[in-house]
Amino acid sequence: MANNNNPRQERLQQQVEELCGASIRALSGERQFAYRGRRPEINGRPSGIRAPHLKPDLAKDDFTSFRGAADGIALRLQHSDRDLHQQMMPESAVGQLLFELLEQLRVETLVEDKYPGAKKNLDYRYKAWCAEFCASNMTENHVGLLVYTVAQVVWSRLSGQPVNEATEGLIEPHRMMLAPHIGGALVGMKRNVHDQVKFGESAHELIQVIDELVTQLDDADDVDGSESKADEAVRNFGLILYPDSDQNGEMPGQATQSHRDRYRDLLDALESYQIYSTENDRVIEAEKLVPEFLRKKLRVQLDELIRGQGVNVPRLARDLAMILSAPELDGWNFGEEEGYLDARRLNKLVTSPDFRQLFRKERYQPHNNCMVTFLMDNSGSMKEHIGQVATLIEIMCRALEKAGASTEILGFTTRYWQGGKLFKRWIGEGRKPNPGRLTSLEHIVYKDADTPMRHARKNISAMLKPDIFKEGIDGEALLWAADRMVGRPEERRILIVLSDGCPMETATNQANEQDYLDNHLKQVASMLEARGDIELYALGFGLDLSPYYRHNLALDLPETLENSVFKEILKLLARRR
């Protein structure tokens, strides 16, 4: 699927992050570390590392900056106790920003002399970030300049290097003002770089001084309800680049809305999505979209692809049954020595006082009451993956059917390229601003949940027809697939999206605000995840889908699928359960 951003740039960003992730795992010994959607995670959860200079951008930074950030993260994982750090986190926004930054500067001073390359990378990255921040004009915000001054003074004290020469004159008045008030804290921090607790106590002393100054400066500005200088500084320093959460999903130091309020807010956000017209939208079965003679020909091609795979389908079915099944009462076991008393056996106790098999126990058997829907992106760029994707879907559906689950295979695309008739009508009617979705949808049913695989074989092969693939409106397709699952008798419902990027429809993107379709997809995915009646997963081909889906897996499909590919998918499903 085409990306609003440069797909080549996105893939390069991912490749760089994969290299950095491997370096971090090697240096820190943390095997579960990985980047997801440009965020550092450990075992699929936020890492808690949110220092602003640890998120370089390929559009602005070079590879040395990425290496420096990677070395900084590795040191953080080695030398910082995350739980202790969160316990000591101050309450104020500026305090949290500074505490995060100071802890990162502490661990970066602990790099050993035998790693001169890492020292050079860390120094390079920090100075590059300082230059970026100054170029953003945030030093014109008095709170931003105050925080920047503290960052420079502490970095200089801990590293033994002079402050940034380019901004030395700029920060000198603030440095002179702060010196009498934070001198003791600086000494304590320098002395205790190997002791996280004592270092944190000294950092709190410094932060208390800064908080008082920030309060006075903001009060003097009298912002009248607009964004305070402190909030602006925090936002521009990038503290929330890596959203962190505890096990309940709450941000540290902050109270969150209840689950119901969050769900309501997501629904309200979805109401802002506009559709110019739905009159030409259609849902169509694959058999009506592709003539039978062509489906037979495509079926032969798909069968040849499947025969060439090295996948053990019966074993895959057994593994899926273990993951998807739930215990269900299936009668009773009698003649047990413990459990519920069986009154029908009491008479034996009279004739045989030593008789102990007087009890019965409930007997449970694994029962699979599950529906799995595969929602396939039929946009143009997916054509290069379609052979492997179609093979993967069919093998998964065969195994799921053997495991006792219902399956549905759906596809989504547009009826025309670049808007078609709707786009021309919009132009003729005066180009009304922000018209919303400006094309007609094509939602395809390759296999419905009530049709067994043996009857759907020819229709499934229709997904190999190249001219089906046009553009994609992912958010609406997600809602459509979810609506089909509502009211089904299965207790457990799983929706798996298969895509290679973000939503892309040329006419809609040109006529609306930036990221219009991207934001709608994020809102729909968040709403479904908050609703909780459907488990939502995504498989990305050539691109990481974690910016859109919480539970996702990036796959580079080989020409010949192997059991290892399916094991990764099973791990995704098992981890969620």
Image (cartoon, rainbow, N blue to C red):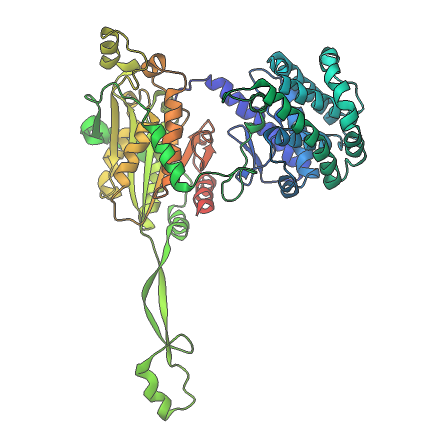
Residue 86 percent coordinates (x, y): 62, 40
Residue 477 position within the rendered picture, expressed as x and y whole percent measured from the top left: 30, 29
Give the residue displayed 81% in from the left and 24% down from the top: 160
| Left or right of residue 296: residue 524 | right
In the rendered image, residue 529, in percent from the top left (x then y), is placed at 39, 38
Q: Which quadrant of the figure contains the N terminus?
A: top left
Residue 371 in view (yes/no): yes
Depth check, front residue: 228 or 321: 228
Residue drawn at 72 percent across, 34 percent down: 205
Kindly identify the residue that appears in the image at 25 percent across and 20 percent down. Answer: 440
In the picture, measured across the screen, residue 457 lies left or right of residue 539, that is: left
Answer with the quarter of the image where residue 337 lies: bottom left
List x then y, in percent, for residue 185.
Answer: 77, 32
Viewer-side residue, 406 vs 454? 406
- Does residue 507 lie above or below 344 as drawn? above
What number of labels is visible?
Answer: 0
Q: Quadrant of residue 184?
A: top right
Residue 388 visible, this angle: no
Q: Is residue 30 above or below residue 340?
A: above
